[in-house]
Image (cartoon, grey):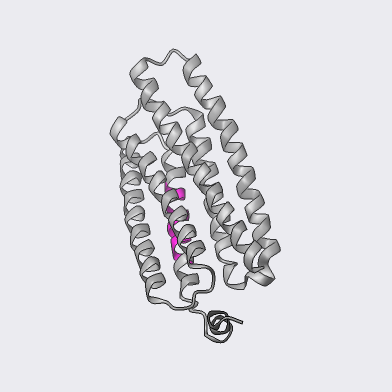
Amino acid sequence: MKINSILSIFAPKDIKFFPLLEETAVVLVQAATLLDELFSSNDKEKIKELCKQIKVEEVKGDKVTGRIFKALNDTFITPFDREDIGTLTDEMDDIIDVINRAAQKVLLFSPQTLPPATAQLAGITKKGAIEIQAAVGELSNVKKSDKVIRLHIKEIKRLEEEADVVYEKGTSSLFQSDIRTVELIKLKEIIQELEKSANKINSVGKVLKTIIVKYA
């Protein structure tokens, strides 16, 4: 047996990564919840305030991400492969970034109306974020919780497939409408960002699947 393998058995694995990953998931859910509120509102002032709040969450997410990568650099033995922890962190942070971009585009473009597909996609993103938070919360006990985590991963995949259908129908409806060209471009960009957020949530599901295959 290699020395590194022996060390990995007897050396204590640093568990600070679990609360840090859970903290990132909390920020993700908060950002997604604000996004859902944003696309459910017709109040322009409330929308502006929600966009600001989402930006605050995005900054929080960046800070937690920085702490996780610092911990990876400072820690000898990690509970999972460094690469998996890093990828999971990056993917969750990416979702928060995309959520923020979608919100900032609403703020920048100030569209006259928001089509139903935007609210649907925002709702799917919120549901996916909640599934991620639940799955991440089980990682510290992955051997006993692998079946639970797999159920969350399955639901994340289902939500991504639902988002694809909503995106296709929503985009098609836009091009079949009589909305003027400038407004059409604005809405198309907003819908694309929302669809990206759902796709990114599925990317997290894939990372979670990799982790449980290795460690469950």
Task: Using the image as rendered, state which of residue 123 and residue 88 is in the foreground.
Answer: 88
* Residue 40 in view: no
* In this view, 10 is above or below 102: below
Q: Main secondary structure of the magenta part?
A: helix
Q: Residue at x 58, y 67 (%)?
A: 139
Q: Residue at x 64, y 43 (%)?
A: 158
Q: Is residue 10 left or right of residue 190?
A: right
Q: Is residue 57 a member of the stretch shown in magenta?
A: no
Number of numbered callouts drawn: 0
- Residue at the limit of the structure toward the left, as seen here: 108
Q: Quadrant of the C terminus?
A: bottom right
Task: Using the image as rendered, state which of residue 91 and residue 194 is in the foreground.
Answer: 91
* Residue 9 in view: yes
Q: Residue at x 32, y 56 (%)?
A: 59
Q: Position of residue 128 (x, y in %)?
A: 55, 49
Q: Quadrant of the N terminus?
A: bottom right
* In this view, 8 is above or below 18: below
Q: Residue at x 42, y 27 (%)?
A: 188
